[in-house]
Amino acid sequence: MTQHDTPVLRVAGRPVGRYVTRPELPDRLAPRPYLHPVTTLAGTAVTELSPADHAHHLGVGVAVPDVEGHNFWGGRTFVRDHGPTELDNHGSQRHTAFQLRDPDGFVAELRWVAAGAELLRERRTVAATELTDTAWALDFTFSLTNVTSGPLSIGSPATNGRPGAAYGGFFWRARKEESAPDVFTADREGEAEVHGTRADWLALAGWGSRRSWGSPRSSEAESGGGWTLVFAGATEDTRRDPWFVRAAEYPGVGSSLAHTERLPVPPGETLVRRVVTVVADGRLERGEAAALVRKAVGR
């Protein structure tokens, strides 16, 4: 892998995220570009790569468990009336080119391929912006265009019969620590109260661990400060997507493209989602989180 394959995002000259375009991964993990490690400005790591509990969780990116029956999430596929099942149905997201590349962001083109055919074409726009001396924002937009001659639809384990498992879309796998992170929105608190709800923003606050940029795995982490991630839907469609949240089993947050029913993507049409994530040192209170979201998103 060359340096060209792993551009580093910087904020105020400091590295805060590495983007891996062509990871060497087995098909079962649904190979795809991802951001990892992502850190706070003070250097606290806030992503996880292929952890033991879910080897197919790859930092920050886009993952969908069911695109017309093809698994772009990785791992087992939930089959109605059978449960999680090992299937040879994994797709891959293939980076093709950067349309723009700067120290603080990039625009990339990707092809979503399964069973030898291209199903979707993606344009991914990622930008890093300084908010304060202790917080920055990751602005992540993806657009998926159906490039086939027929209709496609996006599903999830929930739409296939597993209640509460409507994952699929933007997904951030955070670091698993000794204690589960706190989860809250403007008016709710706790994983059970927040999971599956629609909210302008959602915060995940952990205790912190640090590692150097040369350490690829969490086993090499050292003690560090607390952190808070505040996720905000930045478009009307994104705000309509419920949040998928895990804290006790593992720390992860994502949007739910297919919450209660499959999401159709007719031929030639494009769906767009944008999530802006505040990455802050320290454990923020509600008012602090809301203020940083307003600054990051402009509302």
Image (cartoon, helix red, strand yellow):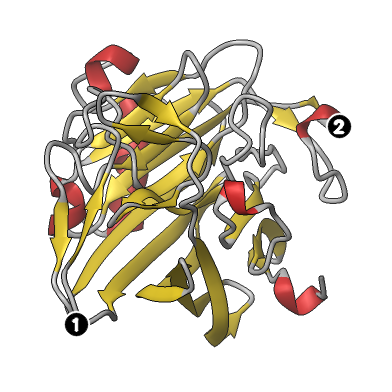
Residue placed under numbered mark 1 in the picture: 268
In front: 189, or 198? 198
Name which of mark 2 and mark 1 comes first in the sequence: 2
Q: Residue 220 carries which label?
A: 2
Please say whether residue 122 is visible from this viewpoint.
no
The C terminus: image quadrant: bottom left
Residue shown at 23%/32% (left/top)?
A: 158
Residue 1 coordinates in the image, percent (x, y) = 81, 70
**Residue type pointed to by label 1:** Gly
In the image: residue 105, left or right of residue 49: left
Residue shown at 65%/45% (left/top)?
A: 39
* Mark 2–mark 1 CB contact (< 8 Å): no
CA distance separating discs 2 and 1: 46 Å
Residue shown at 69%/37% (left/top)?
A: 44
Q: Which mark is residue 160?
A: none
> Is 189 rendered above or below residue 166?
above
Residue projecting furthest to the bottom? 99
Secondary structure of the residue carrying tag 2 is helix
> Is 174 rendered above or below residue 71?
above
State which mark lies toward you, 2 or 1: 1
In front: 3, or 186? 3
In front: 72, or 19? 72
Task: Give the quadrant of residue 288.
Answer: top left
In the image: residue 139, left or right of residue 160: right
